[in-house]
Image (cartoon, rainbow, N blue to C red):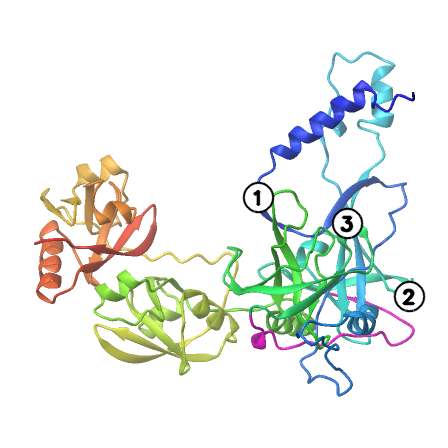
Amino acid sequence: MQNTQPPANQQKRHSRLLAAASAAVIVVVGLGAFALAPDHQAAPPVPHSTEAFAANVPAKPHVQPPRMLENGAPFSFADLVERVSPAVVSVTVEAKAEPTAAMGQLPDDIPEPFRQFFRNYGGQNAAPQKSIGVGSGFIIDKTGYIVTNNHVVDHSSKITVKLPDGRQLDAKLIGADAATDVALIKVKSDKPLPTVEFGDDRQLRVGDWVVAVGNPFGLSNSVTAGIVSSIGRDVGNGPYTDFIQIDAPINRGNSGGPTFDLRGQVIGMNSMIYSPTGGSVGIGFAIPASTIHDVVAQLKTHGHVSRGWLGVQIQSITPEMAASLGSKEMQGAIIAEVVAGGPAAKAGLQQGDVVIAVNGKAVQDSRDLSRRVASLLAGSKATFTVMRDGSRKDITADITQRKDEQVASAQKSGSTGQADVKTKAMGLGLSSLTPDARRQFNLDDNVNGVLVTDVDPNSDAAEKGLRPGDVVRSVGNKAVHSPQDIQGRVADAHAAGRKSVLLLVTRGGGERFIAVDIGET
């Protein structure tokens, strides 16, 4: 009988691979596929990429939804795929690989002729390495504009696009926006190229059918179908994108590929997956078409994205914050910090103001406010409606251009030399900020307020994360300078029938509002 057992060395290698796989952790990952190849080696075949960018135009009259079965399920996606797939391309990116230890200085104890061998084949004189990345993209303009992910083309030295008809064209990077992971590239073609159109992702509902086209693992023209699992998903990559979560299988190499609705219009671009293995487990994220459209418009015109800047740090309103402010309304964003000399400070916006509208349109939360301000043009004016001390105010501010290096940091006034006074409130041990206290907790002289010296582990303050060394700057949006000030604010809240107060807390140079239960008097 023929021995079917693999050799021992293969078994050991297989065991090592299994051990490595078992150590995988669940992460949100981009979907580009990358490999290393020496300079003299030909690049691997470029699989068709899937990127969906649709012009903001109405659907063509001939575009019809797929035929449906009696139970409402689609009969086939074949007509849709046949119509849109010519505009889905493969994107191959070359970039110089970072030098590795093997290419560095050889140890002194390696004798000749081995030193020359390592120089020629694995060391200082080895052939230069380059990385090969494969992703997807989609054509949005017949003259050759193509949308893909920023992480697909980032740090590229050469970009090649392969069309479904087999042609390979060199592409030029027009512009990219890391904040939204959107990039625009362009190819030159001797004839008009097929295109896809934008749909309206704002009309999507959870449960709607979607179709993803791309090149998972380099397999060209792969099509998967599924449904919208969630809308407005925050995956922690910044305030400018609310992702569409889909369960249509997408994998590495799908990055930059389009997600279509049943009319064959692009409603998103595949960007990330949530996976323990790097492969699809049914949780994928697509950048909404509305976000892509706005970003690409700026990339096409300017080559970069400009965002408005107000000069504030903000937080969303929690139920506890709303209660501490004497309101049941949880919409809006509270200003936690105002940058000295910034547009907000010059306009008169204050720490503790709750922004409820911009130019008359209601603000939902801090992410909504961030996106709204970012979309404003530098040099323009905007009217912010705020709630301050129970009154509604309209404040007009000049919008300036956001720079990546801008960081909100308010300047504080100098410290005072009051005597050490201690008391307790809300389960917090409180002390005046004396020179000794500043030294003990390493606090700068420009930090003012009341020091937290200890926290009752059974208190609501402990559950909210307060800890010794924190400095309470205000209670109920009113500055505090001594433990007695805090006791007075708490007594006022009790008299008003409130169950919590809003604290502004400084920690490590940053500031944040925290709503804390006040307990019994």
SS category of the residue bearing label 2 = loop
**Residue wearing tag 2:** 165
**Residue wearing tag 3:** 217
Please tell me how crowded label 2 is: few (under 14), some (14-19), or many (20+) other residues with Cα within 10 Å.
few
Find residue 155 and report its horizontal and vertical position in percent. Answer: 71, 51
Q: Nearer the viewer, residue 290 or 39?
A: 290
SS category of the residue bearing label 1 = loop
Quarter of the image for residue 452 reads: top left
- Please name the residue shown 84% across and 31% down the image: 126
- Please name the residue shown 29% across and 63% down the image: 319
Find residue 35 and report its horizontal and vertical position in percent. Answer: 77, 43
- Can residue 241 be seen from the camera position used here? no
Q: Nearer the viewer, residue 150 or 210?
A: 210
Q: From which residue to which does the magenta span run?
A: 184-205
- Amino acid type for the residue under numbered disc 1: Ile
Kindly report the distance in space between the C-alpha atoms of the residues bearing marks 3 and 1.
19 Å
Q: Nearer the viewer, residue 186 or 53?
A: 53
Q: Nearer the viewer, residue 388 or 193?
A: 193
- Can residue 29 be seen from the camera position used here? yes
Label ID, residue 159 = none
Task: Please give left or right for residue 169 compared with residue 49 in the image.
Answer: right
Magenta stretch, main secondary structure class: loop
Task: Please give left or right for residue 31 compared with residue 223 in the image.
Answer: left
Task: Please give left or right for residue 264 compared with residue 117 in the image.
Answer: left
